[in-house]
Amino acid sequence: MTSFHYARNPLRIAYALTCSVSVIIALGLAGCGAPRDDFRTLKLALDENPTTLDPAYIIDVSGGSVAAKLYNGLVAVDQKLALKGDLAERYEVSPDGRVYTFFLKRGVRFHNGRELTAEDVRYSFTRVLDPATVSTRTWVLDKIMGAEAFLQGKADRVSGIACPDGMTVQITLERPCASFLWLLTMPNAYVVPREEVEKWGKDFARHAVGTGPYRLGEWRQDYRLLLERFDGYFEGAPRMERIEYRIIPDQFTAFTEFERGNLDIVGVPASEFRRITVDPARAAYIHSNVGMNTYYIGFNCTRSPFDKPAVRRAFNYMIDRAKMVDKLLDGRAIAAVSALPPGLPGSELPAEGYRYDPQLAGALLKEAGVPDGFECTLYQNKTKEASHIIEAIHYYLRQAGVRVRIVEREWSSYKEALIKGEADLFFLSWWADYPDAENFFFPNFFSGNAGAGGNKTFFKDARIDAMIEAANGVAGEKERAGMYAAINEEIFAQAPWVFLWHRKEFVITQPWVKGYFLYPIYNADKGTDVSIDLSKTSGR
Amino acid sequence: MGSYILKRVLTAVPTLFGIVLITFILMKCVPGDPVYGMIGQHAPQEVIERYRKTMGLQENVARQFVNYVALLLRGDMGRSYYTNYPVGEAIMEKFPNTLKLACAAMALAVCAGALIGIAAAYWRDSAADRLLSWLMSLSIAMPVFWVGLILIYLLAYRWPLFPPSGMGHGEPAYLVLPALTLGIRSMAYIGRMMRSSMIEILHEQYILAARAKGISAARTLFVHALRNAAIPVVTLIGIDFASYLNGAVLTETIFGWDGLGRFTMTAIFRRDYPVILGSVLFGAFVFVAINILTDVVYRFFNPRIEYK
């Protein structure tokens, strides 16, 4: 074996060089830990890029929450989840619940300087309904008289939208719809200026112009979105000069940025939840609320044995949801009693919810004539959290003698499978677009919405259909709440879902953040009240 | 050489066409429908049908493919179904970021990997060799996302030396952690390859002859031996570099890096066909270009190589 012995070791020279270069680079980079100096910008994170900022096409939470700061609708949701006028100074509803008259605020200007008129509202609503726009959210406005004919190309305008004068919009509905005002709070009903839409065409989202408190500064897709204060905002300019959203998909990374002081407000990630929430020094800066959502296991109600309510009820008794909330979710949710989250009119049931009772579950299965040890498929979206939950559910079902085959799919094919009714059971959640029970009942349990319409259990009950339709035609809040309670009770009894839990949202702010309020609905926050207390930023 | 490169470029055209065709067929075979992603959780059937028609998805697959190729021939990659953003423009925005990260990761991998490999070969069978080999095995075994999170925890959180994420305004500090995360595995592979290649070369007679002629140890090792030992390493570098230029999904996701990998992966999950096709086509083009470049670089290391 030949061996080499070098008088001078070249490797030492090479390593000395490498080390020197590394030290020089490290010294040069030391500046990156420099304290933050820009406190005129509110720094936030989004876990995904907003798909669009064009109101006609917004379907996602990221897009909706940013659009809320760029645009306004006729009405909006306030901190107490009640309706308030937004662009509308006031509104009137005719006694028959079909005609809505909105009186617009004067002096409202778009970011391009032009004053808002009633025609802008007509244009914006007509644009969403226009078949040429190909909006997927036509259902938000299709209750307006003449909307269907216009959508099908049988009319050249939407007959139910009228502008009696420059500052009044009158909307006539095909039939009374109690949730109509709630629908108008959705991003798809925001008002846009015609000239800007026509100027930018397909690229309007990248040059968004609205009447909101912030105007779009810069949008680097998938990386950064900058909003700048609109000094001409009709409710007074917001306190912050800018809002910077950074797109950070990983929760841990976003939280590290927060800990470094580079973000002002951030969601508490599951991995840090225990550590953060037990820290008394942080207690004052943690905001939490129960979101407008319900997590559930859905049954395919067209398939045996899940077409039998007794079997569905039995499954509700098989799962210890309280334990799962406590152990698996660390209390980041509250156990569900029914399909509605607490706080919504109609959410309270006269009876107690389904408790964990495997014996009763077994008895119900026997009563329904279901043989021991039957098999079924349980579909889940391929995420880490869903896998943990499904593991636990699988355990409970197996204990009850149900042999479950788990099918994991990533989101797109998962959704396709559910819409086509391929799954026996599936794990899913529903997040409301507006705080009204109708937004839970109509998409999820109305038989006409089976499949892509939202009713992925294919649940069909003529009586419940009639009750949902009747409640939506009633204008009186109190009467409607009573009807919702009755629907909720009926759905509870029919149990097309295993009602699991309602997720709580936990957000932490920096000590210097003032005036922050965590809204349970993503598009309610206009970002006008939040500010930074510079006296608390020293040393950062 | 010129005619060789031209020949390679010409043969690349059917390759790229084939890749687009295969990707198109695969996309249509896998379950999942882009329309269901775009409608949100609740949309009437007629809205779905209208949307499908507008996107041309109701036509047969062959027709859709022809339409796409016609679009490409007009120099257009289409627009994302979801964001309506022009695909070509998005790729051109993201590619410089991907290139920057790939170059940094590769520079790190090549410098450190080559030095480690040479050191391990030089101190062959010593404790240092065993330690370096163990470190290389460890680097290969560590999952990328884990390395990224550990680096963030240690170097951005515990000792805040580097920014945890983002790209800043182009400051090199933002590159360090993503480049380390991405490059560490390549570094280990290059180190291993360099070690075995160098051990072989160091046994060659011409190395002994060079030393006997009185050529310095450093010159023998870094000029005479390294040049020959580097040829298999260049192949490895070429493959890794081309792969990095197609994006690094996990690294980009963890560090919020706006690159092609995350862009493509998001599109795959959403079945955003124009983005998938555009990204795959661009990625294939990069692969072909890097392969041609690698062949040219071979010649630099070994002038005896002939191109036919």
Image (cartoon, coloured by chain):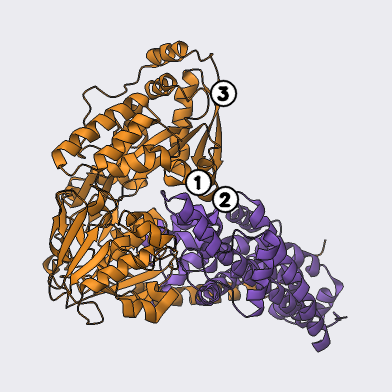
Chain colours: A orange, B purple
Q: Quadrant of residue A112?
A: bottom left
Camera-nearest residue between A288 and B274 = B274
Left or right of residue B203, residue A432 in this image:
left
Residue that carries the numbered disc 1 in the rendered image: A415
- The residue depicted at 45 percent of the width and 76 percent of the height is A25
Camera-nearest residue between A94 and A373 = A94
Residue that carries the numbered disc 2 in the rendered image: B32
- The residue depicted at 28 percent of the width and 68 percent of the height is A122
Q: Are marks 2 and 1 on the same chain?
A: no
- The residue depicted at 53 percent of the width and 56 percent of the height is B34
Residue that carries the numbered disc 3 in the rendered image: A375
Could you tell me which chain the residue with mark 1 belongs to?
A: A
Q: Quadrant of residue B211?
A: bottom right
Q: Residue A443 at x, y = what percent?
A: 37, 43
Mark 2: which secondary structure? loop
Q: Residue B20 at x, y = what percent?
A: 69, 66
Figure check: B76 above or below A180: below
Could you tell me which chain the residue with mark 3 belongs to?
A: A
Q: Quadrant of the N terminus of chain A?
A: bottom right
